[in-house]
Amino acid sequence: MKPLGTITICFPHVDEETRSMLQSVMDEAENFGVFTETLCEKVYSEHSSPLLKYFAFFFSFHIQNYNLTDRLETVGKVSDIARPLYLISMTHKGDTISWEKMKHSLIKAIRAAPNDWIASHLYLTWRLRGEPFFPEVDTDVKPIELITSSVHINKELEFFKSYLMQIKARSYYREDKIQESIELEQEALAILRKYDEQILVANILYSLGNKCKHTDLKRAIDILLTARELSETLGYKYLLALIQHEMGHITALRGEFDAAIQHQSEYINYLNSLGHNSVFVYSIIAHYYNQMKQGRKALENAIVGSRIGRGVARLSAYFPLQIAWALINLRRFDEAKTKLAEAHQIALKSGDSNVILWCRAVDCILDKAENNFETAIECFEEVLKDYKESPTPLWQNPCYLNLTEMEIEMLSEESLKEKTESSGPWMQELEQYVQNYDLPGIAAQTLLLKAKLCHRQGQFDEVRKILKEVKKRAEAPSMRYLNDLAISMFPDIIVI
């Protein structure tokens, strides 16, 4: 492999023995993934300094190969400096680590660091990966303030401005300031490219693709393909897995739920091969089944997904939320309300406006399921207002579909006699929405609602005509679920 800044950036700040070992392994390795595996093999079997053990752990942690990090722990090669990163790896796998234990390990690690550069490297790496699990960092601000001050004063620490930008970008994202988040990540990307830190470059490309998929799908896919190409060159298997995960999200927001589930199933296989806990992915699959209105499968997956517990503190409301939605689909409303109340309580503590809005969206779905249409309409309209500022089709889609379905249900007998082509403004807005975005599965569900309107109007030949078109679209492997949805909506109409 060519010299890589991800490795060489530390050379001015480490002892000669550590630098020589890192250089020799880099000279022999095919790519960064192989470099990390080879370095770990040497540390497993040879006497190593605490700093070399730190970097062996860091590089494994950096590419999230937890098979390597776990083995380092098993053979007693995790130094005090690396201990906070090991605890974070445990939370990633579903373990619950107390804030007190984590804070104690950080204090001990920073004291063991040989210089300010290593201390900054350890703390900011931990912070970047630890924030989703420890909201306590929002109030425990002294460490980040001290390091921020040092980074801006000390030219030797200039590289770490990229970390501070990523941390701030994530904060903006939680506050629903998407554009500000994107702009900061782009600034961080420029610094990382300057220093040739290609692992973090790949991570930011993935993050940018994730964020812009809601407004510019073509650009998102282009960015993700660039990230995939870079990851293949680096031997960065975990990011290849994440890109598979992101393709699941993209196909889901297009309403191609069968394809989305397949992508996430492949993501689970990737995670298992790298020693990760894949349980939480089942909650995402539950989300897809909930949008397909398949309550039983949604509940089965949501229960599996909830086994990760509350380790992911900022996002843990998602787990009871998917259970609540599945119970609504199964018409078990009292149980759903209990789970929904639990989700709301967790969401309010998360400090994440997106999570709070997710809970509000499921409130709307419950109101509609209980035929509280006026309350549900008002609720959905409030949620959509927020999403128009920061588009998120995966949640906007059910808002538009449910509003249109209620509009059809609420039509008077008098208005049905007019046999209009539209049920009203929400159907018109839904039709415009699916035209503006590339959402083939949602467009097909829009046709099913059009068939429902025709059914209420007594235009049964038109219903059959529409159902034939939906059946044709359901031949695509990515949208087979449309057949079941059509049958559930029109059990008495058979289309040959």
Image: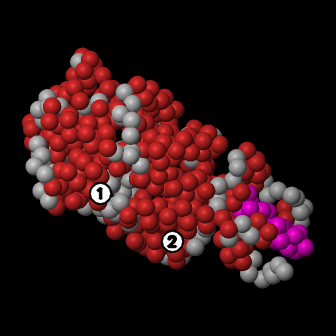
Residues 119 and 95: in front is: 119
The stretch drawn in magenta includes residue 246: no
Number of numbered discs: 2
- The answer to whether 375 appears left or right of 7 in the picture is right
Q: State the colouring used for the structure image.
A: secondary structure
**Extreme residue toward the front, this view:** 28
Q: Position of residue 368 (x, y in %)?
A: 60, 64
Mark 2 burial class by Cα count in 10 Å: few <14, some 14-19, many 20+: many
Q: Mark 1 — residue?
A: 66
SS under mark 1: helix
In the rendered image, the quadrant that contains the C terminus is bottom right
Residue 402: percent from left, percent from top: 65, 60
Q: Is residue 11 above or below residue 460?
A: above
Query: Which residue corresponds to the image point at 29% horizontal and 30% vertical from the top-left?
Result: 9
C-alpha span from label 1 to label 2: 29 Å
Q: Amino acid at mark 1?
A: Tyr
For the stretch drawn in magenta, the main secondary structure is helix
Can residue 183 be seen in the rendering of this structure? yes
Foreground of the two, 206 or 128: 206
Q: Can you tell which mark lies on residue 298?
A: 2
Sequence-wise, which precedes: disc 1 or disc 2?
1
Where, quadrant-wise, is the N terminus in this rendering? top left
Residue drawn where x is 62% and y is 39% of the image: 219
Residue 224 image offset from top left, x and y in percent:
54, 44
Q: Position of residue 322 (x, y in %)?
A: 46, 64
- State whether residue 422 is above or below residue 63: below
Magenta extent:
443-470
Amino acid on which disc 2 is placed: Ala
Instruction: Judge left or right: residue 101 versus residue 232.
Output: left
Name the residue rendered at 56%, 54% in the picture. Answer: 247
Residue nearest the viewer, comparing 288 with 399? 288
